[in-house]
Image (tube, rainbow, N blue to C red):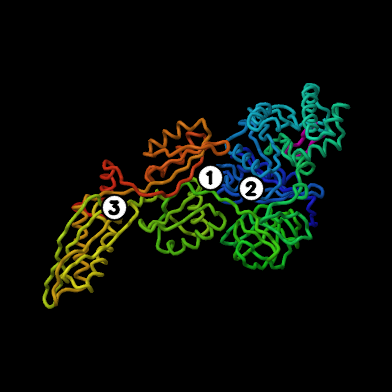
Amino acid sequence: MKEVQSMDVRNIAIVGHGQAGKTSLTSAILFDTGMVTRLGNVDQGNTVTDYDEEETERKISVQAAVAYAMRDKVKINLIDTPGFSNFIWEARLSLRAVESGLMVINALEGVEVQSEKLYDTMEELGKALILVVNKMKKELADFDAAMDSIAASWGKNAVAVQLPLGKGLDFTGVVDLLSMKAFQYENADKGTFKVVDIPADLADVAQSKREELVEKIAENSEALMEKYFEEGDLSDEELTEGLRRAILKRDIFPVLCSDAVANIGVHQVVDFIGKYAPSPLDAGEVAAGEGSVKPVADAALAAQVFKTISDPFTGKITIMRVYAGTFKSDSTFHNISKQADERVGSIFLLQGKNPESVDKVYAGDIVAVAKLKETQTGDTLGVKGKTALFPAYKFPISSISFAIEPKSRDDENKISNAMQRIQEEDPTVRSERDTQTKELVISGNGQMHVELVVNKLKRRYGVEVTMKPPKIPYLETIQGHADVNKKYKKQSGGRGQYGHVMIRMDPLPRGKDFVFEETIFGGSIPRNYVPAVEKGILEARVKGVLAGYPVVDFKVDLYDGSYHEVDSSDMAFKIAASMAFKMAMKEAKPTLLEPIMKVDVFVPEEFMGDINGALSGRRGRIQGMESKGKNMVVKALAPMAEMLDFDPQLTSITGGRGSYFMEFSHYDPLPHQLQKKVIDEAVKEGRVKEEEE
């Protein structure tokens, strides 16, 4: 393909709530611009950007995918992003790599939850916003209602630049309010249309809406406003430049309409992007280090990775936005984040999963590279000593965890490498071995997210696992004092075994773990046996007497005992100490401790009461509330055991508008009435014997 200059690049993240038609619109754009010969269909599983097996089966996007379209000399880089909450972080990350977000609104639903969240991200990042009301050929589609919803959510900056021709199943084209022309589609499957006069029944409405649009454009420039008041209109050139400037400054959010599946209005969407969406040169400098980077091709290379694909067949593919300089094939660059050089062979553009080799790309473009060794998502790439570090990406904290168990020993050996590959492309996935329960725990942004990881393990890497809620890492401790005298004596011919210890056991403050003291007076136990006594205690504390959980926050004082000159040994004293520990623990009022989590719940204010009630119903203790942007944050402490299934309840209460994260805080005593259930379960699992209770 021909080289594309920075001024001719348009970087667009296609974002919005799930099922709004983002992937269908991406497919229609690629078809309209001749990049593909067949109009892809989500239901048929043949779109360019939903190429993962999970996506074709579920009929939803679960990852961001890159493609590009050409209209005349303009190259439109498209990032098709997920709209479901479990994967919305990919859309947020993609918005960092573009100048504009194309927000797709479902004509049947209006503005929905994830669209609101993505709007907030775009506002925070200062990205241009273009809206497309999609699915206009559905029976209950309502452009006016969608516009009301948009205005209610995002105010007067949202202005229609098109009107639909026909309503619902009779939607056949669009009216362009800038040119005051109508585009009537004749063969929607092929995307062919003809330019016609605006129908008489729409003429007055179109004229009124055009006046609103022109006035809105004029408002953003004193010179244009003055001319508009004097002459009542603006020239085509003034409208074009005025609208481009207003979109860049976020003073206007233009609203278009289409039906991507029917391929109506898509050609006009592409034209609008090419003509009005900002180029990298329009957007200007990007913050880096303590300064900024200018989007010029003859500067030092500066790029940032926004997506990594890890595939067992094609290997690792790194996708990056070039902010400055020229990125060339067969070159070496420096990973500023890792302080490591990387050798580049071929570079290519992507159409979904399909690569197209190129020799170089200039500042502002998006490019992919294969098999980089050190580079990960978020890394800055460039020239050592010249390229400043771009701001790091903020990945969401995983909110839900499941334990996974390989079905075979062979799978257990493969799982570590497989998880490493999965985490390369999805940094929000966490996996760790619980040191107490020994379970491998995977954490993600929701149950669907973790299920996706489990499916990837099987399909990509041949690792089959079962998924279940993680075991709660309870602990045991004591609440009282014990004084124990224990003698271990064994004679079985020849040399016997003899160890005798007298210990006191007392509780320690929470978090102090374990203290061992020796206060023997008079040498009743030789000092060389004292370490064996401590070792016996340490080994015994791994399994408490109530439910077989580790014992913490206690002190043992070895104050007396006796020994035998022939039969005593380290082993005998270790066994005696272990037996003494168990006896002492039973006497010292043992109890179970449960992990308490620090929980932050982010919800709109109207849900505060319900969320407080939900947390209280989970034995949560509200610690405070504060305002954060448009949301309120409820801060609470709640038992881990009660929070494992909080995610679906939060979604149900807030309609998907809430989010939360939690992290370990401390341990507290498990209420007495709940301890029996844990102990009974331990007996059932064989962690302790019934008589040990």
For label 3, the residue is 476
Residue 486 screen position, x and y as percent: 15, 62
> What's the residue type where badge 3 is placed?
Glu
Q: Earlier in the sequence, mark 2 or mark 3?
A: 2
Which type of secondary structure does the marked residue at label 2 adopt?
A: loop
Q: Residue at x 37, y 44 (%)?
A: 639
Q: Is residue 314 visible?
A: no
> What's the residue type where badge 1 is placed?
Asn
Residue 148 sits above or below residue 602 on the image = above
For label 1, the residue is 86
Residue 190 screen position, x and y as percent: 75, 41
Q: Residues within 10 Å of mark 3 (few under 14, many from 20)?
A: many
CA distance for labels 1 and 3: 36 Å
> In this picture, which residue range is highlighted in magenta?
182-194
CA distance for labels 2 and 3: 56 Å
Which type of secondary structure does the marked residue at label 1 adopt?
A: helix
- Residue 425 or 222: which is nearer the viewer? 222
Residue 182 screen position, x and y as percent: 80, 31
Q: Residue at x 62, y 30 (%)?
A: 108
Which type of secondary structure does the marked residue at label 3 adopt?
A: strand
Q: Residue furthest front?
A: 521
Q: Residues within 10 Å of mark 1 (few under 14, many from 20)?
A: some
- Report whether 365 appears left or right of 373: right
* Circle 1/circle 3 CB separation < 8 Å: no
